[in-house]
Image (tube, rainbow, N blue to C red):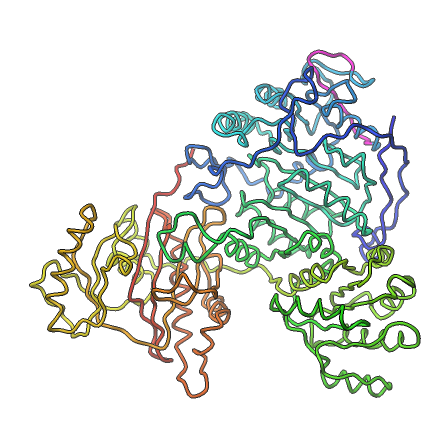
Amino acid sequence: MQSIRLRGRQRGHAGHGRHGIHAGDPGGVLRAPQPRLDDRRRLRRDDEKSPGRVHFRAPLPAAAATPGCRRGVVLNRENTVYEHSGNSLDNDRALAQAFLRPRGVALIGASGDPKKITSRPQRFLRAAGYAGRVVPVNPGRDEVLGEQAYRRLVDAPGEIDHAFIMVAAPEVPDAIRQCAEKGVRVATIFSAGFAELGDAGMVLQQEVLGIARDHGVRILGPNCLGLVNVQGHIPLTANAVVEQETLVPGFLSVVSQSGSMLGTLLSRAQSRGLGFSKLVSVGNECDLAVGDIANMLVDDPDTGVILLFLETFRDADRLARAARRAHDAGKPIIAYKLGRSTVGRTIANSHTGAIVGADDVANAYFRDHGIIRVETMEGLIEAPQLVLGHRPPRTRRVGVISGTGGVAAMVVDRLGVLGTEVAGPPQDMRERLSARGIEISSAPLTDIPMGGSEGGRYSAILSELLASDHCDAVVSVIGSSARTNPQVIVDRVLNAAPRDRKPLAVFLGPKAEPGLAMLQQNGVAGFNTPESCADAVHAYLEWRAPAIHPSQSLPAAAAALAAELGAGSKHEQQAARLFSAAGVPMAPNCVLRDAAQRPPFDGPYAVKLLSGDIPHKTDAGMVRLGVRDEDVREVVGDMLERAARDFPAARVEGVLVQPMVSGLAEVIVGYRRDPEVGPVVMLAMGGVTAELTKSRSVRIAPVSVGDAMGMIDEIPELAVLRGYRNLPAGDCEALARAIAAMSSLAEITAPVVEDAEANPLIVKEKGNGVLAVDSLVTLALPPAKQ
């Protein structure tokens, strides 16, 4: 029997040194070449068919993120919420035990042919030295790979915690019924042929989920590669990387929406001296999802940092809860998410929809829930050592020391592009060094040779940077000596770096894998490229504690008015009433239904057609500004006439007239219910050119007034509101209150607010408040519960 190589604990992971667990003994090593299948493919056959009859995994259909879906639910093709019943299992230790550390495993569909993919889990478990029971289940065999097999799971004696299902998709419902009869707590479904294939697969997936839920069986998958518990010697997976790589125990745990990425992460990380605790592929996430697995890992004593590889958000609420628990437990979560190139929604009725892209929403989600986001795959692998054992920083400043100016400039340049401040040594630090005969300038980059006799000076400066409170992280850049004499260089870094220190990132300019491995093994984050180094440092400095969202800040009158208005797109006066009830100051208005009527206030006026069927009235020529008193009758009559001619199908309620309003700045305050993460609020520069803006700030809604002030600070063009030269200061406090009020629309539940926008919202001088002069809102019925 082959043995999968499992090495003892390494220095620098959660089981060593300061974490209180010492190195263990390495496992045995025996490996033989085996046929390797592309792990992006999944089983779609019974055991007796050719192993070549597999198919490539397709992306999940868009229905999995249908607009209108509340967060933290499972959605079927009919857009119906399918909620988990019973008590929350977030803290269910019995589930975590059965899932991550099962005492008995059933392999349903196990093959006796070692060349078939369905033989892998049994071979892997035995080769790894798994200490629990392994029960092969195959309706056509009494023996599988030399072990007794059973025709049905219920025929097997003893208890089973976890079933790994590898039968063809139509046979999975029966397999789940067997699990229920046997009392199996969790089933991993490796089989494909479900929601990833479209409508028919979705129906089958919902059938499987219904059976499992009725009998208390939790599901991982379907269409997933399973999991690997490296610390526990439990490779419950069909991923070929298990027999291709040496499995090194460590402090990293991974949850991935891509099964094939597990092998990529494992091989790349282990080449840097990093090891793993748990690796989990979630597949279609019909039940257990990324958030559930992350929540289990928070309680896992062998996990120090949780890595996420995400393609989309399918469980935003559950992941948010796990992230808050991880923060409380001192376990950083680092995420790499695909889809950064998506710049907007396909269809957007509001400026907000056009301005706020999917990536803006993802950034807001990660920031507000205390999740570190990295930009590169290398950053995902190399950042964990940087953040292990640390909390979110106080500042966004980094100190940089280098023995090679040109190479360091690449890191500094990238940090600048990302918006991270590189801070020069402060006066008191320079004076302390000067007293020791070391002279440095206040320049952001401290450049001093590291080799030879200069090495002591380099270490002294690095030590001071790590002790100084002028920055919250330090980058050390090392040149050619990292390749020619890595041990000496690493020792100098380690001698300058106390165990209780701020995050230290070391970038080695030349190709120096031995040096990188030495750093990682000694608990120091080493980086292979300037981009990944800057990415990881920037990500750490952008890390925030989970936001505390206000509760019950919406006036009851706003919720009552929303219920009265009902679902659908509302015209501007209806939107203005709702915004005003929520606390957003609105400009006075009146509705004229014919040219004979006159407004009750003096001009000049803003005159707009009142119709919920024409959202962008400026583009349609249905807005006139600066209309004088003597011209208002003619303008109203002309607008009503043109509306009847040009938009015969539109419902026209009349003409909305407002007094002209001026101020220091025009902004847009927008709200939308994102189909993946839920309500978000946005601030950007407003007016008719709103969609051209590059500056915007997005948060998960609702937000506090304090958070809204932070949003204002993130818009460079609004710095003028703080008072610039001789210009008057704007009423930022009133703007922040308006943003918070708009965000409170998230609390309206029946109907829900899908889209809302005040554009422009006029910011007046300090003390004079703000006024929204144009408004838009769309309400929708909440998803039906099943």
Q: Quadrant where the C terminus lies?
A: top left
Q: Is residue 531 magenta?
A: no
Residue 741 vertical position relative to residue 117 in the rendered view, above or below: below
Q: Depth check: 243 or 51 in front? A: 51
Residue 426 as seen in the image, left or right of residue 21:
left
Residue 17 position within the rendered picture, expressed as x and y whole percent measured from the top left: 85, 56
The residue furthest left is 596
Q: Residue 742 lies in what quarter of the image?
A: bottom left
Q: Depth check: 729 or 443 in front? A: 443
Residue 219 position within the rendered picture, expressed as x and y whole percent measured from the top left: 60, 32
Residue 229 position within the rendered picture, expressed as x and y whole percent measured from the top left: 75, 39
Q: Quadrant where the N terminus lies?
A: top right
Residue 445 position within the rendered picture, expressed as x and y whole percent measured from the top left: 73, 76
The residue sitting at 72% across, 73% down in the picture is: 399
Residue 534 as seen in the image, left or right of residue 778:
right
Residue 96 vertical position relative to residue 581 in the rendered view, above or below: above
The reply to whether residue 185 is visible in this rendering is no
The residue sitting at 9% across, 62% down in the picture is: 595
Q: Residue 375 lies in what quarter of the image?
A: bottom right
What range of the chain is rendered magenta? 130-143
The reply to whether residue 265 is visible in this rendering is yes
Q: Depth check: 472 or 376 in front? A: 376
Residue 653 as seen in the image, left or right of residue 220:
left
Residue 649 vertical position relative to residue 79 in the rendered view, above or below: below
